[in-house]
Amino acid sequence: MVKYCCDKYPKGTFKGQKSDGKPMDGWLHQNLKLLATKISQDMTFLGIIFSSTLEVGTGKSVFATQIGEAWTEIINKMYNLKIPYDVDNIVWRPKDLIERAFQIPKYSYLLLDEWDDATYWSELGMSLRKFFRKCRQLNLFIMCIIPNWFQLPLNYATSRSIFAIDVKFTNTLDRGNFSFYNFPSKRALYVIGKRNHNYWASKPTFNGCFPDGYGVDEKEYRKRKLEDMEKYDREEPEKLTKSQLEKKIKSEVLIELLKNFPKTTNEKFSDIFNVSKNTIIRWKRGGVEITPPPSNNYNNITRKKENLRGEKEEPLVNNNNNNNNNNNNNKIVEIDEESVEQSEKEEDYFTRDELE
């Protein structure tokens, strides 16, 4: 372990701290130094953080902010700069990535924190494509947190990203552990392991641990994250699916027909709307309940029962379900010779031998 930000964290800042600074795995710190020496050569780096155990709660955001804190200190010392690092270096939605990239100084660290949304992956892919098309000359270090390594688009997993880090629980659900994959090993992990989501398909370059505690002000971080979530709820109201919209329209038409043709039988309406007789009866008695798609909001959501007779709305509370754990295959898959040869030909940018 090495210590960084010794002036910011003098002895006594943390409980049990025996010397100045915050600890970081030595191999990881050396890799950050290596990247810092190359970023001035018109380079932009993309790192990926994921979790092979549980998709949430493993400490990915804590670890990612610590990396940004250490990176900023390394850059400032190496190039005699005064680049700031705080919550302004973090965005929560892919579409905000490009805008923020033009607002921060050259060589800065920019974190795209994990965002749980149904359109996350498509939006992430489009945002990254736009970023590398428009922002390569900005010379930034981009860190992207994702819930699942194998859902990342192929080209960003195998070609665009320079490394990947698996932040995971121990067998006793303790936080603070990670596995680092350099360029060839993370490429092999994706290509060989994707079919069965097998996180044992490639060995990590090294394993390490990290302490608790955000690398930015935690209160401000949580405040900004909450504000972003609330902003998202206002800008992106839940949309009805095609079938839900069709049901809603039919039920509204039914009410209008009842006003003009009150003697029409349920059987006739059943034929008109191509639904069962019981459905017509239910629509006439109490209205139709439009069930929204599964929500990813951070709090419980209130669904409204749309009453076709104009009666008072009744809130129905729908608790969010926890994300399903990854069902990993613990067997190591066989590696075909062609894949091995291709991986061996790749230059190993982050080996222990090179760093020693």
Image (cartoon, rainbow, N blue to C red):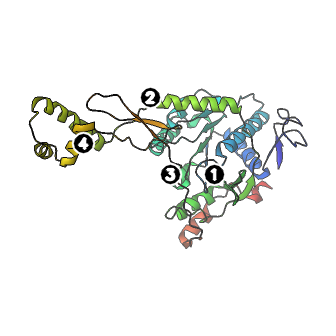
Q: CA distance from mark 3 to mark 2?
A: 30 Å
Q: What residue is rendered at 50% in x and 48% in y? A: 321
Of circles 1 and 4, which is in front? 4
Q: Is tag 4's residue or tag 2's residue first in the polypeptide sequence?
A: 2
Helix, strand or loop at label 2? It is: helix
Of circles 3 and 2, which is in front? 2
Position above or below: 214 against 332: above
Q: CA distance from mark 3 to mark 4?
A: 51 Å
- Give residue 235's mark: 2
Helix, strand or loop at label 3? It is: helix
Q: CA distance from mark 1 to mark 4?
A: 57 Å
Q: Amino acid at mark 3?
A: Asn
Towards the viewer: 237 or 115 = 237
Is residue 248 shown left or right of residue 312? left
Quadrant of the snapshot with the C terminus: bottom right
Q: Is tag 1's residue or tag 2's residue first in the polypeptide sequence?
A: 1
On the image, numbered disc 3 is attached to which residue? 155
Horizontal and vertical percent for residue 263?
8, 36
Q: Amino acid at mark 2?
A: Glu
On the image, numbered disc 4 is attached to which residue? 282
